[in-house]
Every structure is written in structure tokens, then in C-alpha cells.
Image (cartoon, rainbow, N blue to C red):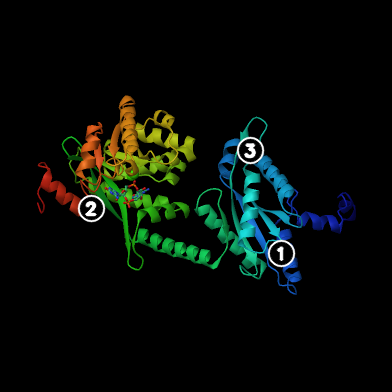
Amino acid sequence: MKSAEANYPQISQHELQAMAYSDPLTGLGNRYRLRDKVRQLAAERASDPAPFTIGIANIDGFKPINDLFGAAAGDEILCQVAHRLKACIPDGATVTRHEGDEFAFILPLVFERTGAERIGHMIKDVLSAPYDLGDRNVRLSSSFGFAVYPFAGQEFEDLLKSAETALYRSKRRGRGQITVYSSEIAQEMKRATQLEQALRNAIITDAVEVHFQPIVRLTDEMVIGFEALARWHDPDLGFVSPAVFVPLAEERGFIDALSETLLRKAVEAALSWPRDLFLSFNLSSAQLMDPGTADNILSILGRAGFDPSRLELEITETAVMTSAETATKIISDLKQAGVRISLDDFGTGQSSLGRLRDFTFDKVKIDRAFVSRISTDRPSEHIVKAIVTMCDGLDLEVVAEGIENRNESEKLRGLGCEMGQGFFFGRPADANATLRYLRDNFRDLAPVGA
Ligand code: C2E
Ligand code: CA
Ligand code: CA
């Protein structure tokens, strides 16, 4: 026993201690160092009740970088981040690596929200400079959550939880956000969690519905298809807009379950429509990052016996951009099966005309923002005209969204826009009302009650 032990290098108590408290990759302190420092500072402040602040920084979109360029590149970025943080934090502050792509700071001289925000902005700027990976540079933003002691928690665990809540809120709001914990923010997060529970429940009990809004040919106002729009009425929360609950399901990771229910219901309804009407269905951006999406959709169609060439999927530019490679694959698999793709909300977001060519869309939907200004605002009219001309040249169909009156409809038709959708032609209606409308207006459908 003794001789075997003698082969190990001697590690002093001191070294062992240092190892237990540091992160081998970056050389920064680890979460135990953070915990001990916070406890120590809190004990010091027991007699002198001055606040102090802890913060967490999380790099946005780190995982795709890791996946795309390899773990070595990811490690290199983490080391560069650690280096920058050490160099930029104020005197007396401590920086640690919390876990993965998350770093933490203790700021003994930051006493309140504005001070924390100021430091947050400074660090954010420092971290946003390009990272040198030898053969390429990458740019990354980062999100921040801060918590001020003792208001946000007296014990380390509570304080950290508050900083995490603040960070979570930053992440929810997109990239590069800074949040300092407060009781209002805690409330806001609590409401989101209640909403999440209720929505999960509604999916399980099949309480989320689909309504349908007609899309017409502008020349004769004939209905040529419908867009499916999710509808949810909760007994306690009332009507909740899909603009709220769809992003929530994305963030909390159950958009697949939600979308599957919606598509299943939409397809079931559309099976009773005349065969030449198409169904347009919104895909969320998270679904375009999930390689399983094409198979999921096609198997729902298969099970229902719905012809894929009657389905159009509406996607947005931001969705396509966040995960271009996966999105391209999903789109090409779906197109192969006959599904058509339309680009939703065109003209908003980071419009890139090049993308229209790269992704071989079939259709472009001009955002309501232009349509609603078309009667009063010359520039909007010119923009719509340019979009229509361009789509013509690229052999893409065009739909104008949000048409609310005859004037808009006629103006759009005059500009050569083929199709339209909006309250002027019909509001979204449930499956039964839609079917009644079709039975009254399409000769080849059996009348209601038949
Ligand atoms: P969107 O895809 O741009 O859908 C069009 C929105 O405009 C719908 O709002 C529709 O009711 C509304 N709208 C239609 N015509 C008019 C009009 O003439 N005037 C005005 N003011 N509004 C009009 P809605 O149903 O509240 O949906 C909001 C957003 O939620 C949708 O925007 C879409 O991004 C998302 N969404 C809705 N259903 C689904 C779904 O099943 N899946 C996914 N992933 N997203 C959905
Ligand atoms: Ca849409
Ligand atoms: Ca739209």
C-alpha cells in the first residue's frame, strides 16, 4: 500500500484546496469560490449593512458555436471570455465560471440597480468584440442577470436564484439583455410560469383550438385557401393571444407538442374542404431548429391522409436565419414531399432579399404594417409595388396580409398583388363556421346537415 501511494505526486493541502475551488479550463474560481466569497462578504456586511451585487453572464448562442466549430473552439472562446472578464471587472470584484457558458461576478461596490446595469453594459460591450479562432472570427452577444444583496436574498442560494431568475428573464427577451432582479420581475416570471402550466394542461386536455382565416384571389375575391390560427381560451386567464402563448411554448420547450395538436386539428378540418383549397399553417422558429420537424409534419399528414401538396407552411426570416443549415434541410425535405413554403411577415425583421433566392420559397406574405399604410403613405405604396415586382421576377406568389377595407384591396390589386387576406374578406372563424361558409359558397360540397 505504502509504496503504491508513494508513486503519486505529493499534493499539498493548499493545492488540493485551490483545485477544489477553481475551474480547470479557464483558471477562474468555480461555483464553490463564488459561494464562499458571497458568504464571506455577507458576513462582513452583517455589521455594516451596505448592499453588494452578484451577476451572471450567459453567452448567447454558444451551443450552436460548439456544435458547428467543435468543442476546442468552444473552449477557446470560454478562455477568451474569462480573460476579458478578468481584465474589465472593477477593482475588488471577483469573476468565476459558474457552469458551461455561464460566468458569475461579485461586485462589492455596486449597491443598486443603475450601478448594476452600468457594469452590465460595460461587460456586454467587452464581450461583444469578435473572438479570434485562428481561421475565423466569431461575434457573440451575452445576456445578464443581477441580484442586489440583501433585497434579492440574504442567503447565498436565494441571492443566486434571484440572479438566475433575472438572467432567465433577459434570455426570454432576446439576446444581449440585462436584468436586475426586483419583486416586479419575480411577479412577471411567476405569471409566465402559471401561463405555462395552464397551457401545458390545455394541450393535454385538447383545449387549444384552431381557427381559419380565408385567403382570397384579389381579382374575383374567390377563397383559395385558409390560414390556420391557434386559439386558446383559458377558464381562469381568459383569452390568451397566440402572440403570447406560441413564444412561451417555444421558450419552455414544448412547441412540438403544441404545434402537433394544432396541425392535427387543422388538417382534420381541412379534409372536409373542397380539394383545391389549400391549408396554410404557421411554423415557429424553434421548429426550424429541430431536425425532427419535417418527419413529424409528414407523419401527421400521413396519418390523416392529407395530401402534402395542399399544405403551405408559413415561416419567418428570423427563423430561417437563426439556424440556417437545419432550416434548409427541413425545408428541402418538406418541399420534396410536395409541401409549399411561404415567407411570412415579409418586410419586417432583418429582410434579406438574397434569402428569397437561397431558400426557394413559393410564396411571400407582405406584412400588414405596409398594407395598413398603403392608402395614406406613398413610401409604403412604393415598397409594396417593389415587393410585388420582385416576386414576379422570381416567380413567387404574393399575398398581402391584413386587408381591412375595399380601398386597400383595390389598391393592392392595382399594384399587381395576386392574393389577399384580412378582416375585409373574413375574420378567423372556427372549423364549423368555416365549413358552413364553404357549404354555402362551394357547389361541390354537400349542404349543411347532409
Ligand atoms: P401571423 O402569422 O402574422 O398571423 C396573422 C395575424 O394577423 C393573426 O393574428 C390574424 O388574426 C391577424 N389578422 C388577420 N387579418 C387582419 C386584419 O385585417 N387586421 C388586423 N389587425 N389583424 C389581422 P393572431 O391570430 O392573433 O396571431 C398572431 C400571431 O401568432 C401570428 O401572426 C403567428 O405568428 C402566431 N400564430 C398564430 N397561430 C399560430 C400557430 O398555429 N402556430 C404558430 N407557430 N404561430 C401561430
Ligand atoms: Ca402567418
Ligand atoms: Ca403574417
Q: Nearer the viewer, mark 1 or mark 3?
A: 3
Image coordinates of residue 389 in percent, x first then y, are 31, 28
Q: Residue at x 58, y 45 (%)?
A: 141
Q: Residue at x 39, y 53 (%)?
A: 246
**Residue 69 visible in this rendered orientation of the protein:** yes
Image coordinates of residue 410 in percent, x first then y, are 20, 38
Label 2: which secondary element: strand
| Camera-side residue of 38 and 301 | 38
| Camera-side residue of 208 and 314 | 314
Relative horizontal placement of residue 74, taking residue 193 as reference (left or right): right
Q: Is mark 2 within 8 Å of ligand 1?
A: no
Q: Residue at x 68, y 61 (%)?
A: 110
Residues marked 1 and 2 touching at CB (< 8 Å): no
Image coordinates of residue 51 in percent, x first then y, are 68, 67
- Residue bearing the label numbered 3: 130
On the image, which quarter does residue 216 sit in?
A: top left
Q: Amino acid at mark 3?
A: Pro
Image coordinates of residue 9 in percent, x first then y, are 87, 49
Q: Is mark 1 within 8 Å of ligand 1?
A: no
Q: Residues within 10 Å of mark 3 (few under 14, many from 20)?
A: some
Q: Residue at x 62, y 48 (%)?
A: 124
Q: Amino acid at mark 1?
A: Val
Q: Work out which quarter of the rendered image holds the N terminus and state it.
A: bottom right
- Residue bearing the label numbered 2: 429
**Earlier-in-chain disc, 2 versus 3:** 3
Label 3: which secondary element: loop
- Residue bearing the label numbered 1: 38
Q: Amino acid at mark 2?
A: Ala
**Earlier-in-chain disc, 1 versus 3:** 1
Q: Nearer the viewer, mark 2 or mark 3?
A: 3
Q: Is mark 3 within 8 Å of ligand 1?
A: no
**Residue 298 visible in this rendered orientation of the protein:** no
